Amino acid sequence: MKCPLCGSEFDPDCKSNKKSACASCPMRGSCELLRCPNCGYEIPKESKIVNFFFSIIKFLRSGKNAKS
C-alpha cells in the first residue's frame, strides 16, 4: 500500500506496523484504520467489495480497448 500523504510504500498486513500503531490507542485495532509507519497518517482499509467492482471495471475497459 502507498501512503497518500508521504508516498511511502508499506505492507498493510504487517503485524509489527499494526502493533506499534495501536499500542496507545483505546480501540486497539478495531477501528479499521491503517497507519503509515513512516509519517503516522491514518488511512481507511480498502474495502474488498469496492476492489472487486474496480477489478470488474478494469476488465471491461481492457476488453473494449482490445477491440479497437
Image (cartoon, rainbow, N blue to C red):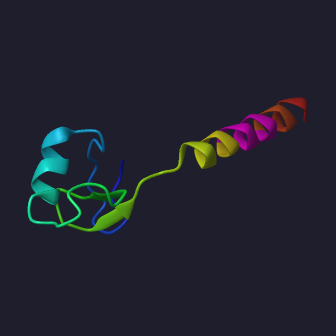
The residue drawn where x is 23% and y is 63% is 27
Up/down of 46 relative to 7, above or below:
above
Q: Nearer the viewer, residue 49 or 68?
A: 49
Residue farthest to the front?
Answer: 26
| Residues rendered magenta in the picture | 55-61
Magenta-drawn stretch, dominant element (helix, strand or loop): helix
Quarter of the figure with the C terminus: top right
Residue 48 location (% of width, % of height): 55, 42
The residue drawn where x is 29% and y is 39% is 13
17 vs 64, left or right, is left
The residue drawn where x is 30% and y is 66% is 42
Q: How many marks?
A: 0
Up/down of 34 relative to 39, above or below:
above
Q: Nearer the viewer, residue 55 or 47?
A: 47
23 vs 12, left or right, is left
Residue 53 location (% of width, % of height): 69, 44
Residue 40 location (% of width, % of height): 19, 66
Q: Determine if the magenta segment contains residue 16.
A: no
Residue 16 location (% of width, % of height): 12, 43
